[in-house]
Image (cartoon, helix red, strand yellow):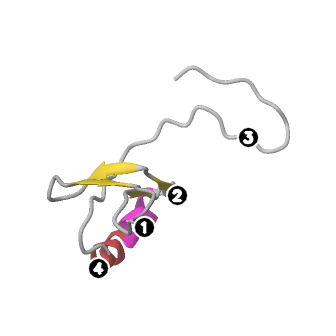
Amino acid sequence: MLRGLAGFGAHSRLHTTKVLRLSEDLPIVIEIVDRTERIEELLPHLDAMVGEGLITLEKVHIIAYRHGKQTTLRPY
């Protein structure tokens, strides 16, 4: 999860952090990496939860997945 410092909402209004204002409408990016069928199963739940926002699906090219032993990167 990443929280942005500024962003444009669905109504093209700038949302920013200000010292004297605690903004609850700052952009948040939540990334989930999983199998296609599991993501598709999650989409109806996301649709029900997100009243205003943007949901995207992106293809991922895995460059490295490491656990323990060091490996070299493969070109893709």
At label 4, the amino acid type is Ala
Q: Residue 66: where, in percent of width, then height? A: 73, 40
Q: CA distance from mark 4 to mark 3?
A: 35 Å
Q: Which residue is mark 3?
A: 66
At label 1, the amino acid type is Leu
What's the magenta region?
Answer: 36-42
Asked if 39 appears above or below 72 in the picture, the reply is below
Q: Which residue of the protein is positioned furthest toward the left in this rendering?
A: 11
N-terminal of the pair, mark 2 or mark 4, is 2
Q: Are marks 3 and 1 in contact (CB under 8 Å)?
A: no
Element type where label 1 sits in the image = loop
Could you classify mark 4 by the number of other residues whose Cα lies within 10 Å: few (under 14), some (14-19), or many (20 or more)?
few
Q: Residue 20: where, in percent of width, then height? A: 42, 63
Q: CA distance from mark 4 to mark 1?
A: 26 Å
Q: Which residue is mark 2?
A: 1
> Image point 49% across, 35% down: which residue?
61
**Secondary structure of the magenta portion, mostly?**
helix
Q: Which residue is mark 1?
A: 22
Q: Indicate which label's residue lies in the foreground, 4 or 1.
A: 1
Number of the label disc, if any, that sits on residue 48: 4
Q: CA distance from mark 2 to mark 4?
A: 19 Å
Q: CA distance from mark 3 to mark 1?
A: 39 Å
Residue 66 falls left or right of residue 14: right
